[in-house]
Amino acid sequence: MEQPDAWHQTDRLDAEQGKGDPFAAAVRATRMPMIITNPRLPDNPIVYANDAFLRMTGYGRDEVMGHNCRLLQGKDTDRGAVALIRQAVEARTDISIDILNYRKDGTPFWNALYLSPVFNEAGELLFFFASQLDVTDRVDAHLRVQQEKDRFETEVANRTRDLTEALATQTMLVHEVDHRVKNNLQMIAALLSMQTRAITDPAARTAMEAMLTRVEALGTVHRRLYQSNNVERFDVAEFARDLATDLVRGSGDRIRLHLDLEAVEIPVAKAPPVALMMNELITNALKHAFPDDRPGRLSVTVAPDEGYFTIKIADDGVGMPVQVMEQRSFGKRLIGTLCRQLSASIAWMTNDPGTIVSIRLPREMAGGLEAP
C-alpha cells in the first residue's frame, strides 16, 4: 500500500510532460502488460494499453481501446473472481488476484492481475491502473500437483477401504472361529458336569470339578474374544472381572470380592495360559482359604508395570500352611508350567491373615508359546 504523500516524491523529478515523461516512457517500454481504465467514463473503459498487453492478449490497440477489460473473460472464467474485481472497483480499492482470461484467438491463460485506483491530490478517482502477468505455467504446475495429490489421496482412500473390508472379513472369520470354539467348550463343560454328578469317589469328583472350571475359564476367554473388536489383543483386566465374578458368585454371598483392575492388553496367543493360571489361583483361594463356609474377602488386582504387568490374588482366609505351599499338586504343577511358558515369575506370601500370590509377566511374547 502506498505510504501517505509518497506520490509527492515524483514532483522532485521535474519530469517533462509528453514524450519526455520518464514514467510514461517506462509504462510504454516495460515488458509487463499494463492498461489504464477511466472510471469516469461509462463502463470504465480501457483508455491506454501498452505493447506488452497487446502482445500477451493478441488484440490490436484499436480492438481494446474504449472497451471494458471483460473482453478477456471466457466460458471458464471464475465468476467469483470477476465478482471480487467488480467489488474492488466499486470500493475504489486495490486487488491482486489470479484469473483465467482468454486471448483473441480463444486460447486461455492465467492472468496475475493487480488493479489499483489512482487519485489526485483532492482525493478524486482519476483512473484504474492494472498490471498483468501470464502465470499459466505456475498455475498449471500447481494444478498438476493438486491433481496428483487428489489422485494419491483417492488411491490411499481406495486402498484403505480395501484393507478395512479385508480386516472386517478377517475379523468376522476369527470371531466365527471363537464362537464355535466357545460353543464346543460349553458342550464339553456340560458333558463334564454330567459326568461329575455320576462320580461317587470324592477325590475323582474333586478332580473332575477342577477340570470343569478350567474348561469354563477357556470358554470365557473365547467368549470375550468373540465379543471384542480386536482380534489380535486380549484385555486381561476385563477377563479377570468376568472370571472372578463368576467363580465368587458360585461360592455364595459369604465371599466379598474386591477388584482393582487396570487395562492391560496382551497378544491373543497369551490369553489361554493366562486364563488357566488365573483360574487356578482364584479357585485355589476359594477352595482352601475359606473352609467350613467361612466368610472372607478375596482381592484380584491387575496392574501394568512398564513392559510387564502384575496379577495379584489376595485373601484374608486361614492362610496356606507351609506343607501346602511346598506340595506338588496338579494345580501347582500346572501353574509352574504356565509360568515358564509365559516367562513369568511367581511369589507366594502370607497376608497376615491369608495368602497373597503375585505373578509378574511380560506384556509381549519373547517367543512362540508352547503347549503346557
Image (cartoon, grey):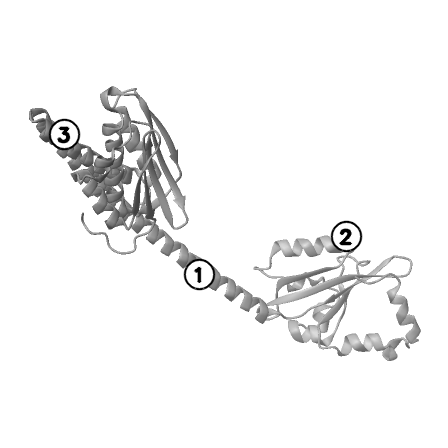
Amino acid found under the numbered disc labelled 1: Arg
Q: Nearer the viewer, mark 1 or mark 3?
A: 3
Q: Which mark is residue 151?
A: 1
Is 203 located above or below residue 19 in the figure? above
Q: Which mark is residue 206?
A: 3
Q: Which mark is residue 247?
A: none
259 relative to 61 in the view: left or right: left
Q: Nearer the viewer, mark 2 or mark 1?
A: 1
Q: Which residue is mark 2?
A: 91
- Residue 217 placed where, x, y %? 23, 36
| N-terminal label among 2 and 3 | 2
Can residue 281 be seen?
A: yes
- Contact, CB < 8 Å: mark 1 with mark 3? no
Figure quadrant of residue 209: top left
Is 166 located above or below residue 179 in the figure? below
Figure quadrant of residue 314: top left
Dot 3 surroundings within 10 Å: few (below 14), some, or many (20 or more)?
Answer: few
Secondary element at tag 3: helix
